[in-house]
Amino acid sequence: MLLVADIGGTKTDLAVFSEASGPHTPLAEARLQSAEHASPEALIAAFLAGAKQPVTRAVLAVAGPVVDGRARTTNLPWVLDEQTLKQRLGLRSVRLMNDLLAVAHAVPLLRAEDLETLAAGTPEKGGALAVVAPGTGLGQACLTREGAHYRAHPSEGGHADFAPRGSLQRALQVWVEEQHGHVSYERVCSGLAVPGLYAFLRERGHAKEDPALAARLAGTLDDTPLITAAAFGAPPDALGLAALQLMVDILGAVAGNLALHTVATGGVYLGGGMSPRLLPLLRTPRFLEAFRAKGRFEGFLQRVPVHVILHPRAALLGVASAGLGSD
């Protein structure tokens, strides 16, 4: 019996699988708010108390790099250690893996209904695959073909230097640098980045802020869902929509960069919690225009397929696949 979890900065998905059930069929599952628990052990214990399944092993996906069996979560004040978790949870084994590595494990298992294709391209059989996932942060990973299977490789490319395109993005870089120093792609292309993009455009007078939305934002700790909902409302909020359009422009460039870094002739997959929410904008030409705007390699990127992952628990699918040995 295998416990799996996708521990994110905002939420944690947990499930129990068995060899017989396979990675597509959890025996129990739940979504918990990460910050409502004092520690990862407390979070897992709360889930197991309700799941009532006799688990013996665990594989946990973590939003952050995993080194020597330890991980410090990027957007939570938690340090996870395989041996410590094993002892405190009373399990036979505990394995930590990067959360985007988990999503990468899931990609070969995704079905047609789990994807929306933005560009069919001309995929190369056995070609490398790239994964870009804007969620709370900005995750990246890739897969390369080795024999009959794909091997997943982790990346922390979301923390690489932001390379702005055009005058608006150059102004954004200066604005973010004044506040944070280093300007990574995650600072301008993630769920955490949305309130900053909104504030940046508001300060530039890009559009007038709606007083009702401003009042709601003043009373919440998480601005991103409110801004996103307003942007796609009827009528759409001009400032919120502009913030998401700016994010989609940057996301297109990020995805195109990773496709070039990895020579992703098999396709690029957009995951994370934000990608499905951004679908109305991803379906417009602006995303693919930014994705392909790579000078002499525009023609190469026109052949690269681009898909949005719609599976609501892709990371859990990947963790289960790795833990059950079916990847």
Image (tube, rainbow, N blue to C red):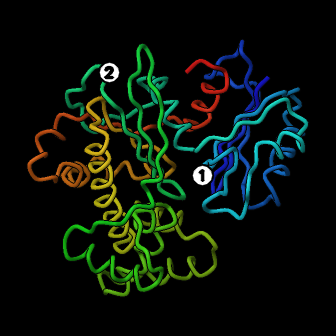
Query: Percent from the top left, x then y, of residue 201?
Result: 35, 79
Q: Quadrant of the C terminus?
A: top right
**Residue name at image x 52 percent, y 43 percent:** 100
**Residue name at image x 44 percent, y 26 percent:** 113
Instruction: Say whether residue 105 is left or right of residue 199.
Output: right
Q: Quadrant of residue 260?
A: top left
Q: Secondary structure at mark 2?
A: loop
Q: Amino acid at mark 1?
A: Ala
2 or 208: which is nearer to us? 2
**Residue name at image x 30 percent, y 26 percent:** 127
Q: Quadrant of the N terminus?
A: top right
Q: How many marks?
A: 2
Vertical side of 18 occupied by 151: above or below: below
On the image, numbered disc 1 is attached to which residue? Answer: 63
Vertical side of 2 occupied by 239: above or below: below
Q: Point out which mark residue 126 bears.
A: 2
Q: Amino acid at mark 2?
A: Gly
Instruction: Say whether residue 48 is left or right of residue 298.
Output: right
Can residue 278 be seen at all in this image of the molecule?
yes
Query: Percent from the top left, x then y, of residue 270?
Result: 40, 43
281 or 135: which is nearer to us? 135
